[in-house]
Image (tube, grey):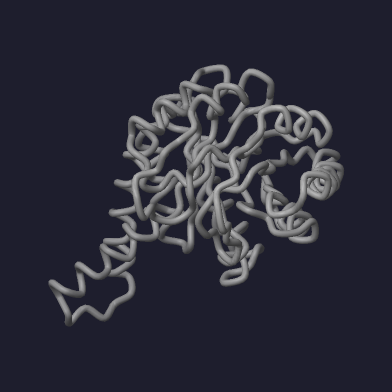
Amino acid sequence: MPLVTSKQMLLDAQKGGYAVGAFNAENMEMVKAIIAAAEELCAPVMIQTTPSTVKYGGLDMYAAMVAAEAKKAKVPVCLHLDHGSSFELAVQAIKAGYTSVMIDGSHEEFEENIAVTGRVVQAAHPVEIPVEAELGKVGGKEDDLEAEADTNTDPAQAEEFARRTGVDSLAVAIGTAHGFYVGTPVLDKERLSQIRQVVDVPLVLHGASGLTDEDVKDCVKRGICKVNFATELRAAYTDAGKKLLAEKPETFDPKALGKVGMAAVKEKVMERMKVCGCDGKADCRG
């Protein structure tokens, strides 16, 4: 089917008490693997690209690639700009065919974050593209953005932010981090529950790679409607290629590396979809 937006997808998740898995794709193989996993589990899915991925391959390339694969799928597929770094990039993504965008102003002061987020909302909503924003600072590193320390989201600020910007979903900081965790993450789940009580829009969890299944499930129960996975997919893809080369060092065909990478990513995506509870939530009748 044609690409869909994240609007109804996340509202359905919010109503149904599950979360949509949002998976970062770096190449064609990962796109195919993610959609294959969604098809097998009959799950709605969001495919994401970050600014560094966009810089590597181009907005038009990823938009065309994901749209072509989505057209063949029976499940709803959304193409999302993850951690959009500027108003200009968000607008370019919309023009290229992305069906959901994030503007990440979390590194700015509160009022500046509201201003840039509101500007993207004003540009996106007239063409019916939903907008995700972030409030608070998720630790770790995503592309070139690195947080020196975790600054968890304030519930009162979250309510004001959502109301003043008109965003469609909100990524919150509760102790997660981008990349792999050095130690055991300690999540402020009570804060998440407090945010959910005062914010009506679907909530998003970033930095989920490396969290336990129990942590992810608990966060979903407390109101998370979208969960991002990136680092562990990259690792699965790369590790599969390394294993093949270790076992068969004479391998030279990139397609052989791509096949094992796809299999590894598909398996990881299916695992995470089941944890999010989105398996079986799509209408797969075609």
Q: Quadrant of the N terminus?
A: top right
**Can the viewer see residue 22 in this picture?**
yes
Residue at 33 percent across and 57 percent down: it is 262
**Can the viewer see residue 282 in this picture?**
no
Pick out the residue farthest to the left: 247
221, 82: nearer the viewer:
221
Residue at 74 percent across and 53 percent down: it is 108
On screen, residue 71 versus residue 279, left or right, reads right
Expressed as whole percent of the image width and height from the top left, the position of residue 174 reads 53, 37
Residue at 55 percent across and 22 percent down: it is 193
Residue at 33 percent across and 34 percent down: it is 213
Image vertical order of residue 32 relative to residue 286, above or below = below
Q: How many marks?
A: 0
On screen, residue 13 versus residue 30, left or right, reads right
Expressed as whole percent of the image width and height from the top left, the position of residue 203 reads 60, 31
On screen, residue 263 versus residue 174, left or right, reads left
